[in-house]
Image: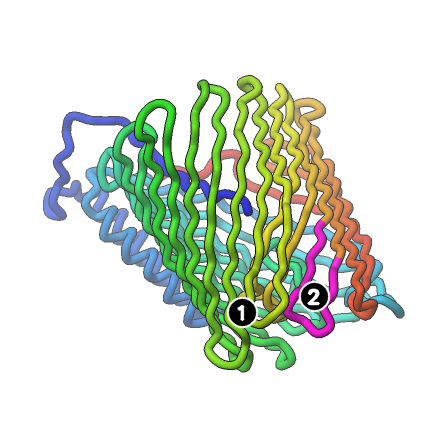
């Protein structure tokens, strides 16, 4: 499975590390901070009424932390960037059905904004993008979509940082990069994710991190289950010298369903790295997962191991390759194994980029439209973007994915294909237009799940070239 890289920011050193008290803040900053606090209070109230209590509470948590951090800053800059987009989309299969497909034109308009408060060591960012969709042929009811995000980052010292974020989405969109199960119908759903992380560096390449994620899915469709997942994790990266290093990670995950059986699992990974040069590093990894169900389902263990390398071909291209073997071990059931081959190649051009990747692994569905249990998957993907000239650019994204659901009776496979191509033109520094085509298809061993959808979209987007600074 793909490695998870933790990003962090470094701030320039300064000889003056003292922090002024609240009383020493200049009065213009105090007045501005009070105005911003009042604006954020009103904004949270509107978000609460629009998107509900859980998301409002998550965003308020980010706001409270940010204001406590920003009050000790000697200066902070307020940045505000509004935007609005409008477009029309055509689809030849509104409900993703195998037969008797229906087409429609969907008109949408989406105002939005991002508000940032940037201090010397602390940064707060809030964004909100509602969107209204109208179906010309009334195949579905018109609806409002809401997307909100809040993020707080603070540099605690030269070598430590902390961040917390909350994202919220209320939509009827049937597609998601987080969910490859099948969603049909019109009922909206809410997806919430709150996360926090602490990163401590020690030495040039060494770091220790703690993280926590809590997410839940609420469906208004009574045939779909709500679910919630919480997952704390700890990770350490340590190099004993210039040649040898280790990466170790431990994760606990608990998933609760409304009616289905809840489960939890412990997983741990250990990777040993060997650096041969500035460009070439090899690794060997081992992993173990123990999954336990609350009631009647059979518990199982998963063992996996693999080896590979990362090679920086030159300053613009990187290649990573690995071969893994995993096996799910049942006490009294059918064992499942697989040998995914991971290839990840990226190339930067003067006017673009491209990426080619393959891989696979195993997972258990959680916070998805369908609760289908343990599955294995394999995928291949090609994506790229190119600037044809100063104002004209475009890109493609091609993906094929096979998912094998091992806990279903009977077991079945879904072959998923997605293709996206777009071209965009900047009419002015503040206005752009984009033309996009999407192909989405599923071919399943359960033919009732099959569908093919073609869609095209034309969208205009207006935004300020740079955020307003106050």
- Magenta-span inclusion, residue 197: no
- Residue named by callout 2: 182
Apparent side of residue 338 relative to residue 208 in the rendered image (left or right):
right
Image quadrant where residue 352 sits: top right
Determine the secondary structure under disc 2: loop
Apparent side of residue 47 relative to residue 347 in the rendered image (left or right):
left
Q: Is residue 275 above or below residue 184?
A: above
Discs 1, 2 touching: Cβ within 8 Å:
no
Range covered by the magenta-colored residues: 401-414
Q: How far across and down, in percent of the image, does residue 112 sit?
A: 53, 52
Residue visible at 63% across and 32% down in the picture = 428
Q: How far across and down, in percent of the image, does residue 404 sit?
A: 69, 60
- Residue named by callout 1: 331
- Camera sees residue 46: no
- Camera sees residue 387: yes
Image quadrant where residue 203 sits: top left
At label 2, counting other C-alpha atoms closer than 10 Å, the crowd grade (few under 14, some 14-19, many 20 or more) is some
Q: Quadrant of the C terminus?
A: top left
Which of disc 2 and disc 1 is earlier in sequence?
A: 2
Q: Is residue 202 above or below residue 48?
A: above
Determine the secondary structure under disc 1: loop
- Closest to the camera, between mark 1 and mark 2, is 1
């Amino acid at each position: 499975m793909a490695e998870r890289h933790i990003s962090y920011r470094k701030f320039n050193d300064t000889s003056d590390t003292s922090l002024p008290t609240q009383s020493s803040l200049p009065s213009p900053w105090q007045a501005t901070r009070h105005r911003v606090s009042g604006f954020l209070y009103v904004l949270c109230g509107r978000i609460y009424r629009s998107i509900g209590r859980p998301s409002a509470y998550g965003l308020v948590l980010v706001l409270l932390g940010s204001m406590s951090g920003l009050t000790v800053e000697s200066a902070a800059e307020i940045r505000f960037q509004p935007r609005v987009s409008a477009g029309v989309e055509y689809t030849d299969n509104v409900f993703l059905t195998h037969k008797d497909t229906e087409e429609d034109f969907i008109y949408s308009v989406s105002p939005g904004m991002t508000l940032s408060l940037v201090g010397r060591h602390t940064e707060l960012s809030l964004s909100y993008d509602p969107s209204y969709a109208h179906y010309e042929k009334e195949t579905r009811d018109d609806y409002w979509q809401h997307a909100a995000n809040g993020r707080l980052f603070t540099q605690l010292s030269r070598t430590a940082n902390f961040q917390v974020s909350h994202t919220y989405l209320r939509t009827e969109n049937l597609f998601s990069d987080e969910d490859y199960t099948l969603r049909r119908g019109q009922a909206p759903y809410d997806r919430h994710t709150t996360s926090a992380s602490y990163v401590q560096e020690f030495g040039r390449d060494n770091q220790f991190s703690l993280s926590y994620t809590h997410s839940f899915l609420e469906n208004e469709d009574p045939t779909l289950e709500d679910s919630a997942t919480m997952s704390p994790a700890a990770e350490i990266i340590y190099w004993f010298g210039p040649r040898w290093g280790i990466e170790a990670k431990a994760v606990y995950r608990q998933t609760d369903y409304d009616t289905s059986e809840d489960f939890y699992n412990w997983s741990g990974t250990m990777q040993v790295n060997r650096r041969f040069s500035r460009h070439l590093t090899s690794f060997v990894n081992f992993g173990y997962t123990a999954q336990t169900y609350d009631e009647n389902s059979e518990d199982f263990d998963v063992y996996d191991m693999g080896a590979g390398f990362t090679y920086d071909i030159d300053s613009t291209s990187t290649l990573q390759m690995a071969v893994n073997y995993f096996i799910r071990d049942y006490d009294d059931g059918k064992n499942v194994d697989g040998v995914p081959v991971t290839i990840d190649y990226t190339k930067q051009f003067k006017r673009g980029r491209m990426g080619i990747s393959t891989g696979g692994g195993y997972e258990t569905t959680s916070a998805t439209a369908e609760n289908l249990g343990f599955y294995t998957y394999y995928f291949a993907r090609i994506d790229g973007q190119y600037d044809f000239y100063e104002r004209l650019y475009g890109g493609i994204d091609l993906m094929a994915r096979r998912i094998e659901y091992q806990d279903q009776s009977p077991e079945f496979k879904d072959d998923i294909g997605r293709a996206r191509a777009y071209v965009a033109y900047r009419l002015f520094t503040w206005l752009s237009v984009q033309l996009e085509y999407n192909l989405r298809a599923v071919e399943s061993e359960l033919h009732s799940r099959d569908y093919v959808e073609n869609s095209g979209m034309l969208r205009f987007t207006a935004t300020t070239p740079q955020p307003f600074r106050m």
